[in-house]
Every structure is written in C-alpha cells, then in structure tokens.
Amino acid sequence: MSDAEHVDVAIIGAGVVGLAIAAELSSDRSVALLERHESYGRENSSHNSGVIHAGIYYPPDWLKTTLCIAGNRLLYAWADDHSVRVRRTGKLIIAQDEGELPALEELLSAARLNGVPELELLSQRQVVSLEPSVEAVAAISSRSTGVIDQMELMRSLESAAVANGTSVAYVHDVQHLERSGVGFELDVRDPQGGELRLSASALVNSAGLAADRLAEALGYDVDGEPRMRQTVNKGRYYDIVTPEKASRLQRLIYPLPHADRSGLGTHVTLDIDGGVHLGPDTEWLEGSASLDFRADDARRAEFLAAAQRFLPWLEADDLLPGQVGYRTKLSGPGEPPRDFLIWEDDGYVHLGGIESPGMTASLAIASRVRELMG
Ligand SMILES: Cc1cc2nc3c(=O)[nH]c(=O)nc-3n(C[C@H](O)[C@H](O)[C@H](O)COP(=O)(O)OP(=O)(O)OC[C@H]3O[C@@H](n4cnc5c(N)ncnc54)[C@H](O)[C@@H]3O)c2cc1C
C-alpha cells in the first residue's frame, strides 16, 4: 500500500467478517483491507468453536437470528463452491431431567418461530439411538448445525477479495481516523514502522474487539446512542484427549442455555479435524485486561462437574486445557444480551458486538453492509 492512496472503501480488520465484506464490496468498488497482524483471523476468528449455528437462541427480529439463518445457508453454499471443509454434524440440545422438559419445548417453539429449518423433538430412546453415551431424557435435534474449517474459510474469502482487486495490507495498524472532504483519512503504521496516509470515500469498522476504540477516535460518543462501548468476556475450552472417549460423541451436544442467555452452558463441540472440546465458559474481564490466548488450567473441576451431568463416564484425566477466546460484547455483567450493531452514518459503517454467531453470519453481514452503503 502506498502513501496518499485513495480507495472507495477502507475496511479495518481482516477477521472473518472484514474479509467477507471485502469479498462482497470489491466486486464493484476499489477496496483496501487493513489488518494489524501478520495475517488474517488472528483474534476472534481463529479462537472460536467453528460451529455453523442454526439461529435458535435469540428473538426472531434480531440480526443475530436473521443473519445467522441466512448466513448458515450462504456458508454451506460458499463452502461447496470454494472447497472449504464443512461437516453437517447436527446438534442436540438436551434436557438432563424431567424438570427441564418444559424449557426444552419452549426453546423448540421459539426456534420454529424464528424459522430455523430441520428441527425435531427427540424422545429418550431416539437420543440413545443417536448418541448412546449421552445421558438425556429428551433433546432438540438441529440438523442444519455443523462445523467449518475457519482458516480455510478465511483463506477463500481473502482469495475472492484479492481476485476482485482488493489491496490487503497486513501489519498495517490504523492509528488515527478522521472525517475529511473526500470522506475519511486514515493514518496507518506500516510494517517498517513508518506512517502512511490513506483516504477513502467510505469506511467500514470491522475491528472486532477494538471497534469501539476506533469509533471513539473518529469522534463518536460510544456510551451514547447507538451504544458502541464493548465489553470483553473470556471463554476457555477443555479438550477431551482420551481417543476412545472422544470417539463416543458424534454430534455437538448442548445443555439448555441459561435462562437469561448469558451463556450456552458447558457444551461439547467437534472440530473439522475430529477434535472434541468442552466449552467455552464465560468470564467477564476488565476493559483494560490484556488478551492472553494461551491455554490455562484454572477451571478443570468446574468443566468436569458440568460435563459429568450428561457424560457421567468422563474423568479429570480425560481433559486438557484447550484454546481461549474473547467475546466482543455490547452488554456487560448482569445485563441482558444485546443484538449485533450494524450501523451506517454518512459513509461510516460500524460493526459492534460481533460475537457468536458472527462467523456463521459473516456472509449475510457482508450483504447487509452492502445494503446500508447503497
Ligand atoms: C469463544 C468464542 C467462540 C465462538 N464460537 C463461534 C461459533 O462457534 N460460531 C460462530 O458463528 N461464531 C462464533 N464466535 C464468534 C465469532 O468468532 C466472531 O463473531 C467472529 O470471529 C468475528 O469476526 P470479526 O472479523 O468481527 O472479528 P476478529 O476476528 O476479531 O477480527 C477483527 C480484526 O480487526 C483487527 N484490528 C483491530 N484493530 C485494528 C487496527 N487499529 N488496525 C488494523 N487492524 C485492526 C484485529 O487485529 C482483528 O484481526 C465465537 C467467539 C468466541 C470468542
């Protein structure tokens, strides 16, 4: 990228969402995609469960629902067209005792109202026939849930964007932003530590955990309306490392979510390579906390106790600490969840709180950004 370059659209952040937006917008505009790390997806987009969600958990009119359902279909189709590995594993949401049955049925009705396809209520016998190692009295089966290779997905999105002429600039850290006569001016630190200036007619802030700080730099009151101030919530995983035990599980297994949707409960995910994981858990962090992606072993007992409720054969030695991720949230501790914020203001598009199901929704978010930009 050269100094004093002008593009139609500058996008900050090469996570899965920024890449999807670059692939979408570059079909008919000049685009620069700026990323501070050496490559794509070094933050949220590589430290997640890789689940293609179905759209079950949130209200019908939320973007987290509509863009998830649309994104689910788009993602499977994209994966087919671009040779990205996916597995339609399916998922079971289980009732662990009779007392949970009303909540399970309520969740199923809500998911059907959302328009989620391929759902079914399973009896205990049906659960046993599908997952003989899981203890449950009933389950919702979601057949449109699956898993994807996130890194291959991002590689394919980057290739599509580059094929359309996008200038992708890694190790380019956006330091300062301002509005100008042409639209926006961005001061960027380049790989040599020098500064360069880029101008753009439109600006998409897809900076994940840093999106609120960049909006503030542009002059927005992040505590005003719309609220852009983000909070960070850590999610740890444990891996089931005893091969024979890991091989007992064929599908994603989720307990019922917390009633306030603050978390989905300790669940089992499979990854595209066959790894089996528990988690992620939830832990609120102070805004100033530094993000440490190294595995930590602070919660083995809690994970084991939660998982043993439906996997009674699991033992402490079957677990090793797995990856760690950091959710980008718009709600704080004790607050109800909030929807994605996808907001346009005179050429500026802000993407806030793009937590799960953001990867599933990525292609649908990109279409939404195109609509907003006209
Ligand atoms: C624990 C966990 C599990 C999850 N599981 C799932 C799941 O199973 N399914 C699902 O659909 N979603 C899941 N998600 C959500 C999903 O990972 C995110 O919604 C998605 O990755 C968000 O992508 P993004 O591009 O917005 O953000 P990111 O991937 O974080 O990308 C933002 C990028 O912006 C860059 N950036 C920031 N500031 C600057 C700057 N000043 N200059 C240049 N670059 C900058 C960053 O370096 C970063 O690369 C999960 C999230 C977490 C944390």
Image: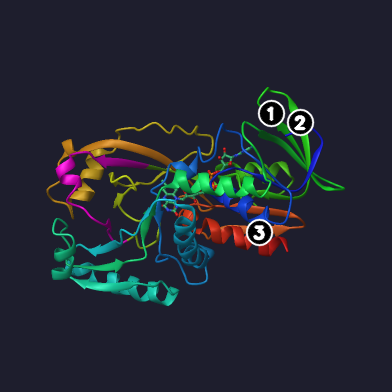
Extent of the magenta region: 236-256
- The foreground one among 189 and 243 is 243
Question: In the displayed structure, would residue 54 be above or below residue 322?
Answer: below
The residue that disc 2 covers is 196
- The 10 Å Cα crowd at callout 2, few under 14, some 14 to 19, many 20 or more, is some
Q: Where 256 falls versus 324 (above or below)?
A: below
Q: State the quadrant of the C terminus.
A: bottom right
Left or right of 176, for residue 226: left
What amino acid does circle 2 point to?
A: Leu
> How are the colours assigned in the image?
rainbow
Whole-angstrom CA distance, mark 3 to mark 1, is: 28 Å
Is 160 part of what is drawn in magenta?
no
Neighbourhood count class around disc 3 (C-alpha, 10 Å): few under 14, some 14–19, many 20 upward? some
At label 1, counting other C-alpha atoms closer than 10 Å, the crowd grade (few under 14, some 14-19, many 20 or more) is many
In this rendering, does residue 351 appear at all?
yes
- What's the mark number on residue 343? 3
On the picture, is 18 further left or further right than 104?
right
Compute the Cα span from label 3 to label 2: 27 Å
Q: Nearer the viewer, mark 3 or mark 2?
A: 2
The answer to whether the beta carbon of the residue marked 1 is less than 8 Å from any atom of ligand 1 is: no
Kindly identify the amino acid type of the residue bearing the numbered disc 1. Asp
The residue singled out by tag 1 in the image is: 190
Mark 1, secondary structure of its residue: loop
Q: Which mark is residue 149?
A: none
Q: Secondary structure at mark 3?
A: strand
In the image, which is nearer the foreground, mark 3 or mark 1?
A: 1
Residue drawn 26% across the image and 73% down it: 121
Report the front residue among 210 and 172.
172
